[in-house]
Amino acid sequence: MASYRNNLPQLDNTLLLTDSGLETTLIFHEGHDLPLFAAYPLMETAEGRQALARYYRRHMIIATDHETGFLLEAPTWRASRDWGAQLGHRPEDLARLNRAAIGFLSDLRGAAHAVRPVVISGNIGPRGDGYQPDTAMSAAEAEDYHAEQIDWFAETDADLVTAVTLSTVAEGVGVIRAAARFGLPVVVSYTVETDGHLPDGTPLGRAFEQTDDQTDAAAAYFMVNCAHPDHFRRALDCDEGWLERIGGIRANASRLSHAELDEAEELDAGDPDELARDYAELRRLLPNLTVLGGCCGTDHRHVEAIAASCAASAIA
C-alpha cells in the first residue's frame, strides 16, 4: 500500500535525502555492466538485487545519522518500452520488472525502522537521449508513451512518480498529464546545459512556467538534475515565482558539459565538500527545496557531505 500518495511529506517542509548516481556508482565503483545505462535488469538476479540493496541501505544510513527522511527512487529510469526493447524486454517483462522494483523498495522501507518518513518514487527517464532534444515528441505523444509505465506504478506501493533528465517542456507536460490519468502525484526534473538552458535552448525558469501553464500547475514540484550547480546557479539569481516550485536537486559532481561527460572514459567525482557548500547555498536561494541527492558521478560520500551541510539547519 502507498503510504504518502495523498500527503507527500516533502511538501510540508520535511527534508528528504535521496540517493546519488546509481548507474555511475554501479558501473565505475562496483564494476557492474549496465548496457544502455539501465539498472533495472539487476532486479532479475539475486546478485543484482543484493547490489541494489547495499546501495540503497548505504544511503539510508546517512538519513538515519542526520535524522532526515528518505526518498527511495526506483532503479527504473530505463524501464520503458523503447529502451526495454533494445535490451530484449517485452512490455509484459517491463510491467513485471517495474512492479518488482517498487515491491523491492517497499520491502526496504518496511525494514528501515530508524528512518521516517520513507517515500517511494517510481522513476521515469526520457523516451530518447535526455541530452538530444532532436527526437522530441509532442506533449500528446509523450503522454501516450509514458502512461504505460505510470500505469504499472499506479498498481504498486509507489507514492509518486518522478521523471528525471527531461530536456523538453513537451515531454514534461506529457508526463504530468499521464500521471493525472492515474491519480499519482508527479515530479518533473529538467536537465540543463552549462548555460542554464534546457538542451533545446529553453531557459530553465521559462521551462517551469510553460510546464505549469500547460498543466494547470499539476506537478507536485519541479527538480533540476544531471547538471552541476554552477550550470544553473545564475538562472536562480532572480525574484520570480517559479523559484518556489523547485522542490528537489540532484546535481552532478562534475562541471563538465553533457557532451564532455559522454566522451569521458573516467569518472569525474568532483569534490564532495565543495558540492555540499553549493547545496547549502541552493537551500538559501530556494525556499521549498526539500529533496536533496546526487546524479552522475556522485556517490554516498557526496550525499553524506550534503546532509552534514544542510540537515542541521533543517532540524534547527
Image: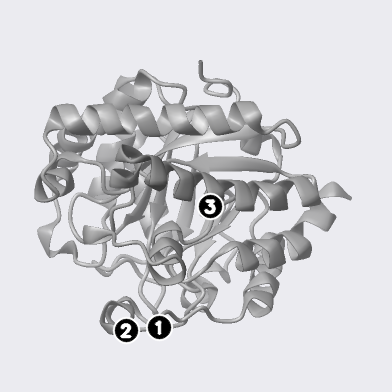
Amino acid tagged 1: Leu
Residue at left offset 47%, top offset 71%: 297
Please tell me how crowded label 1 is: few (under 14), some (14-19), or many (20+) other residues with Cα within 10 Å: some
Name the residue located 42 percent from the left edge and 42 percent from the top edge: 49
User: Quick check: 228 left or right of 17?
Assistant: left
Q: What residue sits right under mark 2 in the picture?
A: 264
Number of marks in picture: 3
Q: In what element is the residue under mark 3?
A: helix
Tell me where residue 68 sits by quadrant: top right
Which image quadrant is residue 93 in? top left
Q: Secondary structure at mark 2?
A: loop
Label drawn at residue 55: 3
Whole-percent x and y of residue 63? 71, 48
Q: CB atoms at circles 1 and 3 under 8 Å apart?
A: no
Please report the residue visible at 61 percent of the width from the left and 81 percent of the height from the top.
Answer: 271
Q: Is residue 311 above or below residue 50?
A: below
Q: Please state if 259 lies on the left or on the right of 66 as rendered.
A: left
Q: Quadrant of residue 225?
A: bottom left
The crowding category of the residue bearing disc 2, from other C-alpha atoms within 10 Å (few below 14, some 14 to 19, many at least 20), is: few
Q: Residue furthest right?
A: 316
Q: CA distance from mark 1 to mark 3?
A: 25 Å
Residue 290 appearing in the image? no
Q: Which mark is residue 256?
A: 1
Give the color scheme: rainbow, by chain, secondary structure or one colour.
Answer: one colour
Q: Earlier in the sequence, mark 2 or mark 3?
A: 3
Tag of residue 143: none
Choose the circle earlier in sequence order: 2 or 1.
1
Q: Is residue 301 left or right of residue 32?
A: right
Give the camera-side residue of 224 and 159.
Answer: 159
Please state which amino acid type lies under the numbered disc 3.
Tyr
Q: Position of residue 66 (x, y in %)?
A: 79, 51
